[in-house]
Image (cartoon, coloured by chain):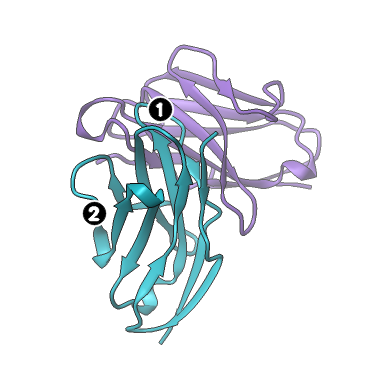
C-alpha cells in the first residue's frame, strides 16, 4: 500500500514551453501533497504544499506564477512549469500524505520526474 | 526555523564494517524524525521513523536509529553494511502536527566489496 506515481518519469522540452507533471496516490487518498526539487548531488528542497481543493502554499523564493500547482482531487496533484528555462532543469519529486490513521504523519514519495530544458 | 544537519557528506566503507551516520536537528518542540534512503536511480524509501515512545527505533534492512532528545540527534546505525547498502541517506524532521518535512543535505554511502 501507499504507492505514489509520477508521470512522466522524464521530459525534455525547449526553452519557453510549459511542462506538466502529474503526481498520483494510487491506493490511498492524499489530503496533502508536496512538491520538492532536487538538484544533482543535493538534498530535496520543498517547493510547495497543496491541500485538496485549496490553493497551494509556496515556500519562500518559489515563484507561484512559474510553478503552478493544482490539487484537484484526493488522488491527483499537478505541477506545471511555465515558460521553462534551462535553470529549471532539475529532478522534481512529489510526495503524498494520508493524514489519517497510524500513518497519517508519513509522506510517501513518488519516483520523481527529471526535467531537462534545452 | 527548523533545520537538519548531516555531518558526513560522503562515507566509504568496506563490507561488514559498522555504520553510523550523524543527524542533528534544531527545533524546540515535539518532532517526528525520519531516515530515508535513495538507491541509485530509485525513489526515496522510508528506512525508519520516530514519532514517540522507545527512542531506539528499528527499521528495515537491519538499520536502527536512536533519538537522543538532549543532543537533538537521531543517528542512523547498522552493525554490518553490505554492498547493496550503497545509496544516499537523508535525515528529515517535521514538527509535531506540522506538515513540512525538512531534509538534511544527505550522506552518500559507498560500500566496497
Judge whether A113 appears above or below A22 on screen. below
Callout 1: chain:
B
Q: Secondary structure at mark 1?
A: loop
Callout 2: chain:
B
Query: Of callouts 2 and 1, which one flags the residue occurring earlier in the amino acid sequence?
Result: 2
Q: Secondary structure at mark 2?
A: strand
> Crowdedness of circle 1 by 10 Å Cα count: few (<14), some, many (20+)?
few
Where residue A62 appears, as percent x and y from the top left, is 68, 29
Chain seen in cyan? B
Q: State the mark number for residue B80.
A: none
Do the dots labelled 2 and 1 sit on one chain?
yes
Camera sees residue B43: no
Image point (33%, 41%), residue name: A3
Residues at marks 2 and 1, CA–CA distance in whole angstroms: 21 Å
- The residue that label 2 is drawn on is B57
For residue A117, what is the image quadrant?
A: top right
Image point (36%, 84%), residue name: B15
- The residue that label 1 is drawn on is B98
Chain A palette colour:
purple
> Crowdedness of circle 2 by 10 Å Cα count: few (<14), some, many (20+)?
some
Q: Nearer the viewer, residue B62 or A72?
A: B62
Amino acid at each position: 500500500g501507499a504507492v505514489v506515481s509520477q508521470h512522466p518519469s522524464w521530459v525534455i522540452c525547449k526553452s519557453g514551453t510549459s511542462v506538466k507533471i502529474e503526481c498520483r496516490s494510487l491506493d490511498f487518498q492524499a489530503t496533502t501533497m508536496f512538491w520538492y526539487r532536487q538538484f544533482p548531488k543535493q538534498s530535496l528542497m520543498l517547493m510547495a504544499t497543496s491541500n485538496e481543493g485549496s490553493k497551494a502554499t509556496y515556500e519562500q523564493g518559489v515563484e507561484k506564477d512559474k510553478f503552478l500547482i493544482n490539487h484537484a482531487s484526493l488522488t491527483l496533484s499537478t505541477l506545471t512549469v511555465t515558460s521553462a528555462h534551462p535553470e529549471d532543469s532539475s529532478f522534481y519529486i512529489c510526495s503524498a500524505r494520508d493524514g489519517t490513521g497510524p500513518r497519517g504523519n508519513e509522506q510517501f514519495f513518488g519516483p520523481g520526474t527529471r526535467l531537462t530544458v534545452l | 526555523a527548523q533545520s537538519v544537519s548531516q555531518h558526513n557528506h560522503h562515507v566509504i566503507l568496506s563490507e561488514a564494517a559498522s555504520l553510523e551516520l550523524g543527524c542533528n536537528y534544531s527545533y524546540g518542540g515535539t518532532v517526528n524524525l525520519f531516515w530515508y534512503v535513495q538507491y541509485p536511480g530509485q525513489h526515496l524509501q522510508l528506512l525508519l521513523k520516530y514519532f514517540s515512545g522507545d527512542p531506539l527505533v528499528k527499521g528495515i534492512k537491519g538499520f536502527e536509529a536512536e533519538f537522543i532528545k538532549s543532543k537533538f540527534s537521531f543517528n542512523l546505525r547498522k552493525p554490518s553494511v553490505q554492498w547493496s547498502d550503497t545509496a544516499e541517506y537523508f535525515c528529515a524532521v517535521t514538527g509535531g502536527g506540522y506538515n513540512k518535512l525538512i531534509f538534511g543535505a544527505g550522506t552518500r554511502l559507498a560500500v566496497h566489496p
